[in-house]
Amino acid sequence: MPAPDAPIALAVHGGAGVIDALAPDQEQAIHAALAQALDAGHAVLQRGGAALDAVQAAVVALEEAPWFNAGHGAVFTAQGDHELDAALMEGRTRRAGAVAGVRTVRNPVQLARAVMEHSPHVLLVGPGAERFADGQPGIARVDNAWFDTPARLAQLQRAQAEEREGAAAAGRYFGTVGAVALDRHGHLAAGTSTGGMTNKRWGRVGDSPLIGAGTWADGQVAVSATGWGEAFIRCAAAHDIAARVAYGGASVGEAADAVIFGTLPALGGDGGAIAVDAQGRLALPFNTAGMYRGWIDRDGRRGTAIFEA
Ligand code: ASP
């Protein structure tokens, strides 16, 4: 049994990027959704549960909320439908599971967990991942249109209009969700779930389901990233944060800042990350206008925020 006073800590994000002007009731609803995800994850940690279960519970709560680009509320592809990606990683064992391009799985993070526990693989994609889901009784399935929301459709239409005019590149709208946790046993886990980038095509997969790019956990650090996935992939962002701690002796805050404010913008990338270390120290840096985020630190202090504090 772990010591009842062993530290626990949790952070969640609902994406970073250009955040459209929010009506006050919308802003309130987003804070409430972040708080609900924190509650879901923290309840697991408080009863001595595993960081992996806490992360999964928090990510499922965010997938269910319409405000974020994951599960219900995911962005639209260029074809006007949804392809979802998710990953989970357990630090102590380095076990990991991930899915990409799934279309009928209500909570992709649960399928990622099933890949980790019930397959010999780490990452399953597209129709193969769907076939795997067919054999997993606990995985809820929905019609692809279940992920639709009017706000995301409007974003797609705007992105496509801009594209026709040769203006901004598609995909300004982020909103991926993620969670990182430290449990009372001293174990870490990370999870991330996303619809990817608005107007994506050709089976595009971002950083979220790629272990080491958008999601990572080892014995010392757990990381979930959000932002322009291509840049996160090109600098193995989540793993780089952990490596700076492991090999460079950086604190989790220094390591996360170095990647989010240094390596990533040097590649033209924007976004943010949440990270926690084995002592329960949290880091939530972002180089964008905002990042939906929430935390409960090792002293039990909690908060949610959207823009710069
Ligand atoms: N990183 C995600 C992707 O590129 C998008 C996001 O964070 O919103 O798929």
Image: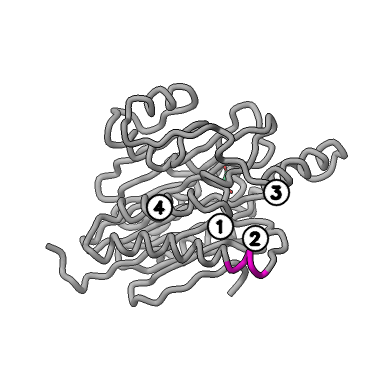
For marks 2 and 1, the one nearer the N-term is 1
Q: Residue furthest right?
A: 165
Q: Amino acid at mark 2?
A: Thr
SS state under label 2 = loop
Q: Determine the main secondary structure of the stretch shown in magenta.
A: helix
For marks 4 and 1, the one nearer the N-term is 4
Crowding near the residue tagged with mark 3, few <14, some 14–19, many ≥20 C-alpha atoms within 10 Å: some
Residue where numbered disc 4 is placed: 243
Q: Report how far apart the C-alphas of labels 2 and 1 lie in the structure.
A: 7 Å
Contact, mark 2 vs mark 4 (Cβ under 8 Å) = no
Q: Report how far apart the C-alphas of labels 3 and 2 lie in the structure.
A: 11 Å
Residue where numbered disc 2 is placed: 288
Q: Report how far apart the C-alphas of labels 3 and 4 lie in the structure.
A: 29 Å
SS state under label 3 = loop
Q: Quadrant of the N terminus?
A: bottom left
Report the label total.
4
Q: Report how far apart the C-alphas of labels 3 and 1 lie in the structure.
A: 14 Å
Q: Residue at x 59, y 52 (%)?
A: 175
Crowding near the residue tagged with mark 1, few <14, some 14–19, many ≥20 C-alpha atoms within 10 Å: many
Residue 27 highlighted magenta (yes or no): yes
Left or right of 266? Residue 88 is left
Contact, mark 2 vs mark 1 (Cβ under 8 Å) = yes
Crowding near the residue tagged with mark 4, few <14, some 14–19, many ≥20 C-alpha atoms within 10 Å: some
The disc at residue 172 is 3
For marks 3 and 4, the one nearer the N-term is 3
Crowding near the residue tagged with mark 2, few <14, some 14–19, many ≥20 C-alpha atoms within 10 Å: some
SS state under label 4 = helix
Which label lies toward us, 3 or 4? 3
Q: Amino acid at mark 1?
A: Gly
The disc at residue 272 is 1
- Vertical arrangement, residue 286 with respect to residue 175, above or below: below
